[in-house]
Amino acid sequence: MILVTGAGGNLGSAVLAEVARSGTPHRAMYRSKEEAAKAPRGTEAAIADFADKASLAGALRGIESVYLVCSPIPELVRLEGNAIEASEAAGVRRIVLSSAMGAADYGKSFPSWHRQVEDKLKATRLACAILRPNSFIQNVLAFYAPSIRTQGAFYSAMGNARTSYVDIRDVAVVAAQALRGEHDGQTYELNGPEALTCAEVAAKISRQAGIAARYVEIPAEAQRQAMLDQGMPEWQVTALLDLQAYYTGGQGGTLDRVLEGLLGRPPITMDAFLAENAAAFRAPSASA
């Protein structure tokens, strides 16, 4: 039986959908009754919290494989560490860990936290598969669409750095395979099919949504202040800018065929994703 943690989140819910589609017996972990009530039909729901090992024991009862994902917060190492320890105690056979690009070689920000969890997991007797995805295509929708709708532009300090965006749904397919034991002992860097600059992303948005979308380069300090003005906590702003420095240092544009080989088909492209979500980039009057 498979346990999917973070089932209420974007990545966890996508993995849950893939696991459910395969027909494999599974359970989804949520943090509250309200979230658990949204579990898909046919999915067993468990309410547990990474901070509460007793609750984890109940969620892990009878589980063979765990998909482990946690929000990118400073407590990530401790919380995912709790899940690993609880999994060992419950007799779980394998963990599929959602890590991040840069975990292999970047000592700052989210990648460094993920690396600590990777090391803890590898030190156990559990079988494991580690997935290190590049930036998600869905981030374009979450972070760029709001200002494009209101101002026709999005802003960042990415320069001409390239990013090989990957669709969460493609990552979920690989995670579901790993949960069935197909990738034990493997660590995969998962990159998308294209390495795009922000200006190229803006051009694709313009074409697919039928609007004029621009990328506006701003200084990193201006970006920092804008995020702080939006109410983001300082630790998060610093972590995001540290991660951005990794990308602008030329580390985010890797192109390979690893993901295509695992999927057995080409990964989802930026154009395909934007065509699917074109209305989200248009101003309300343009979408009416």
Image (cartoon, helix red, strand yellow):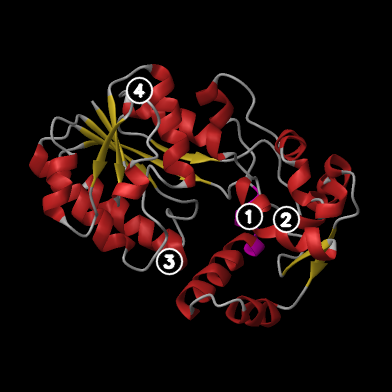
Residue 107: which disc? 3
- First of labels 2, 4 by sequence position: 2
Amino acid type, residue under disc 1 in the picture: Ala
C-beta proximity under 8 Å, tags 3 and 1: no
- Nearest the viewer among 223 and 253 is 223
- First of labels 3, 1 by sequence position: 3
Q: Which residue is mark 2?
A: 145
Where disc 1 sits, the SS reads: helix
User: As displayed, is residue 94 above or below residue 231?
Assistant: above
C-beta proximity under 8 Å, tags 3 and 4: no
Label 3: how many Cα within 10 Å (few below 14, some 14–19, many 20+): few
Which span of residues is magenta-colored?
248-253
Amino acid type, residue under disc 4 in the picture: Glu
Label 2: how many Cα within 10 Å (few below 14, some 14–19, many 20+): many
Alpha-carbon distance for marks 1 and 4? Answer: 32 Å
- Nearest the viewer among 243 and 71 is 71
Query: Magenta span has 108?
Result: no
Residue 63: which disc? none
Q: At 46% across and 67% down in the image, what residue appears?
A: 109
Q: Is residue 193 visible?
A: yes
Residue 182: which disc? 4
Amino acid type, residue under disc 3 in the picture: Gly
- First of labels 1, 4 by sequence position: 1
